[in-house]
Amino acid sequence: MLPEAETALAIKFEALSPDVADSLAAKARGEPILAKNWMVAVANPHAATAGARVLKEGGTAADAMVAVQAVLGLVEPQSSGIGGGAFLVWFDATTGKLTTLDGRETAPMAATPQLFQNTNGERLRFWDAVVGGRSVGVPGTPALMEAAHKRWGQKAWSGLFAEAIDLAESGFPVSPRLAALVAGDADRLRQFSDTAAYFFRGGEALVEGSRLTNAEYADVMRQMSTEGAQVIYSGDIAQAIVDTVRGAKSNPGVISLTDLDTYKVKERPAVCTPFRGHQVCGMGPPSSGALTVGQILGLLDHFPVGSKNDPQTLRLIGDASRLAFADRGRYMADSDFVAMPTKGLVSADYLSERAKLLTGSRALTDVLPGNPEYSHASLWADDVSLELPSTSHISIVDSYGNALSMTTTIENGFGSRLMTNGFLLNNELTDFSFSSHSDGVPIANRVEPGKRPRSSMSPTIVLKGGLPTLVIGSPGGSRIIGYVAEAIVAHVDWGMNVQAAVSIPHAVNRFGTFDLEKNTSLEKMVEPMEALGYKVKLRALNSGLHAISIAKDGLAGGADPRREGIALGQ
Ligand code: GLY
């Protein structure tokens, strides 16, 4: 599958380097990129090129991530950047250990559980909440970049911003995706003068292929490169963030300088679940990613490998996912604020009990949360948050054998639509539940001051025998979970190479409706799945999976054909 936009992009990026042209061509043929030493798979050829330069010069995956993220914030500003947050999973080749860093946005101390309610206590409409200052959480990505570099970097921090500064000053071609998204979001983007001035130069929406510069972003990158991430959290840029959020003409927010100055990246243990002799490891709370992907795969592990085009295989994947989403809605939130049965949700006993629910042959009629083991019980009501597709994923393996999986976001496409100093501010707080209670029972993922909103981001590293075999993740809102779980099944169960696994047509089931990807071979599954009792919806399913497989004979990289990314390796 090669969408038209991808063909246009291939032509535009051919001039960038022969490696980029080769990678785009391989992707168009549906083939993975092969390498022996290192690999980077990300959402944009300029970002991949920056990461590849660092890896080629002997940098670690953490060094390369800094260069990649700095460029992504410029060339793919709608998806991620220094105004947003991220989660990072790291396999350390020296110690053989896996850990995670939580750079999630945080609710300001002045935020209350009523943040997204009107004066009658009713939930705001989604778009009324997103656009403006109210939805902006304290950004975590700059601090995460620095924390990862301090911990695992080898190259000088100051040298990791060269491509971002150069591209921001000399300009880069507006990608087809960016141009289409700007045109499609014009009414919201035009509401704020700085945002409108950047995306609508001379009043006209950015045109695909036109050269875009961003002097303010270059200046911020230069400041970060010389003074560190602290420039975002105190001083002029921090003040500009506060002024932009609090002074937003619609929906002013409540961030303060103290909120920015006290932001902390948190190291947390990885959450791992066994699947077909592998350990599937990822980001625990406040992300629901590893627990929900883990539950889906942990439930499937109780059944033999099904064939790819069998309705019963789809039924198992779909209903395992529905069971997992029921638990997600009830129990998952920021575990620093609410008691969570993190271990219980993926314990072997619990999953084998839940798997008994899947032994029938038709769609489950009732899907309720289960009763995982709790160290101390809490009563929670079910969350009904809406999460729309957005975000970007970075997969990197370096020549030392370290592996990095990082999903990075400003939440909605273009985040809150507020822009300062050449970067967009997130709307991550709308990942909280807008309702604080249901029938008088509190919702675990309600807004609280200093809390991190529940995420679906699922940066994942799959281990076998203690060593990484697959690095993977995707954008896509709460569908991220299904995209990642399904690609792991495709790679592990069906033996598909990484490019084939990230390209596989999507079948995603979160809350009951089976979403099947439009214009793919899955269209012929509509009737069989309806016959099993599902409501089926054909739709575009816009993942952005980036994956690297690691085997004895080398690395293979794959980039999602639905987006503009590539893999580069050597
Ligand atoms: N905002 C996307 C996520 O965190 O899941």
Image: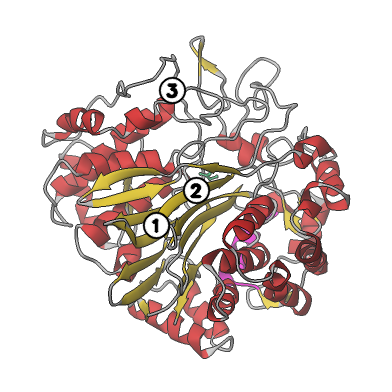
The residue tagged 1 is 96
* Left or right of residue 356: residue 523: right
Q: Is residue 113 above or below residue 549?
A: above
Q: Is residue 322 above or below residue 460?
A: above
**Crowdedness near tag 2: few (<14), some (14–19) or many (≥20) residues, C-alpha within 10 Å:** many
| Residue drawn 21% across the image and 47% down it | 314
Q: Main secondary structure of the magenta part?
A: helix
The numbered mark, 2 or 3, whose residue comes first in the sequence reads: 2
Q: Hey, what amino acid is under mark 2?
A: Thr
From the viewer's side, name the closer residue of 229 and 517: 229
Give the spatial CA distance, label 2 vs label 3: 27 Å
Q: Position of residue 170 (x, y in %)?
A: 76, 80
Q: Hey, what amino acid is under mark 3?
A: Asp
* Left or right of residue 151: residue 212: right
The residue tagged 2 is 100
Give the spatial CA distance, label 1 vs label 3: 38 Å
**SS class of the residue under badge 3?**
loop
